[in-house]
Image (tube, grey):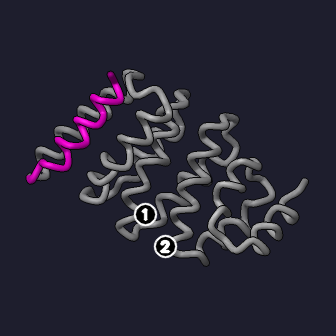
Amino acid sequence: MRLCAAIILNLQFKAAKKIKDRKRIFDFYLKQVRAERVNSWDIVDVSAPWMGVYLTEVEDPMPLLIKLSKSKSLWQRRVSIILTFALIRAGDLEPTIIISEALLKDDQDLIHKAVGWMLRELGKKDVMLLRKFLTNHSHQMPRTMLRYSIEKLPERERKKWLISSKR
């Protein structure tokens, strides 16, 4: 039922023509996130990319993203990185880098997968930026995060990153 509610919220957000209406929907969404009602990977992954569109309309999304990334809640941390998907699509790649760095040492596999996914998406926009991130951080990235992030790179390069990152 909650997944259905998230989809309906996405549709309402998409239909909202005024920024004040999108803000109201986004604020409602954040209230649900903070109340731990957005608490499974599928609900986060369906809702956060749409809700992240609102962040493309605000002056500085970083305070919110950083606050979510530092939460004790696995789901708030996952929301923090998946919200950056909309920013990636809009060409704003720096928030993904910053939140990925903040979540590098997270101990949750669902965070490793989410960060790897967003880095892979970032690499579709700017492969050199992905390579720079990997050069700086591949040695400390959890294996799952690294594998997800390099998935779209040429096979030879993927092998290079996997070998060079071994501890």
Nearer the observer, 114 or 135:
114
In the image, taking residue 15 as reference, residue 110 lies left or right, namely right
Nearer the observer, 131 or 144:
144
Q: Which residue is labeled 1 in the image?
A: 88
Q: Amino acid at mark 2?
A: Lys
Q: x, y percentage for residue 120?
A: 58, 62
Q: x, y percentage for residue 68?
A: 46, 38
Please count the marks in the image: 2
Q: Amino acid at mark 1?
A: Ile
Residue at the far right: name it.
167
**Residue located 70% across and 66% down the image:** 134
User: Which span of residues is magenta-colored?
Assistant: 1-17
Nearer the observer, 97 or 127:
127
Q: x, y percentage for residue 111?
A: 60, 40
How packed mark 1 is, by other alpha carbons closer than 10 Å (few <14, some 14-19, many 20 or more), is: many
In the image, taking residue 102 as reference, residue 160 lies left or right, namely right
Q: Main secondary structure of the magenta part?
A: helix
**Residue located 54% across and 37% down the image:** 70
Depicted 99 relative to depicted 90: above or below: above
Q: CA distance from mark 1 to mark 2?
A: 8 Å
In the image, taking residue 164 as reference, residue 94 lies left or right, namely left
Depicted 76 relative to depicted 59: above or below: above
Label 1: state its secondary structure: helix
| 42 in magenta | no
Q: x, y percentage for residue 163?
A: 87, 63
Q: Which mark is residue 125?
A: 2
The quarter in which the N terminus is drawn is top left
In the image, taking residue 45 as reference, residue 128 lies left or right, namely right
**Residue located 75% across and 60% down the image:** 138
Instruction: Tell me if label 1 and label 2 are in contact, CB under 8 Å.
Output: yes
| 13 in magenta | yes
